[in-house]
Image: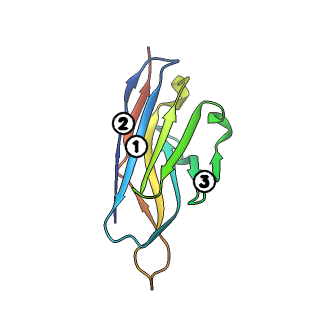
Amino acid sequence: VQLQACGGGLVQPGGSLRLSCAASGNIFSINVMGWYRQAPGKQRELVAGVTGGGTTNYADSVKGRFTISRDNAKNTVCLQMNSLIPDDTAVYYCNAEVRPGFWSGYRTYWGQGTQVTVSS
């Protein structure tokens, strides 16, 4: 199973970015998909997650500004980030709990990370 993320970049404060992540490989089903981020000198933290049924969860710091969405048919998850602030600067990682086969349990997979920099 591979997770391929894209969409990071440099944006001015108040701007927007959209991150996308696609899961591919041996996939029987996917439970939760989400986005984490890690800023320099800080621990990796959950930004947002979404279940297969569409239930979402957000970090308090991004509520009202970020929106997570998912396409179950395409095994993709997106993160729309609006009203970006410098504190949002970090490497963003997509994450998925994947069941590779009928007889398999769920395993956690990570994308390669994409840099988001918010600066004027």
Which residue is pictured at 46% across the width and 70% down the height? 29
Q: Nearer the viewer, residue 12 or 39?
A: 12
Q: Nearer the viewer, residue 51 or 117?
A: 51
Report helix, strand or loop for mark 2.
Answer: loop
Residue carrying label 1: 20
Which residue is pictured at 64% across the width and 42% down the height? 59
Q: Which residue in the rendered view is the most extreme toward the right?
A: 60
Residue carrying label 2: 7
Report helix, strand or loop for mark 1.
Answer: strand
Q: Distance between the Cα atoms at labels 1 and 2?
A: 6 Å
Question: The C terminus is located in which quarter?
Answer: top left
Q: Which residue in the rendered view is the most extreme toward the front?
A: 73
Residue carrying label 3: 54
Residue 27 placement (x, y as % from top left): 38, 70
Q: Nearer the viewer, residue 102 or 19?
A: 102
Residue 22 placement (x, y as % from top left): 37, 53
Residue 72, compared with residue 120, is above or below; it is below
Report helix, strand or loop for mark 3.
Answer: loop
Which residue is pictured at 44% across the width and 19% down the height? 119
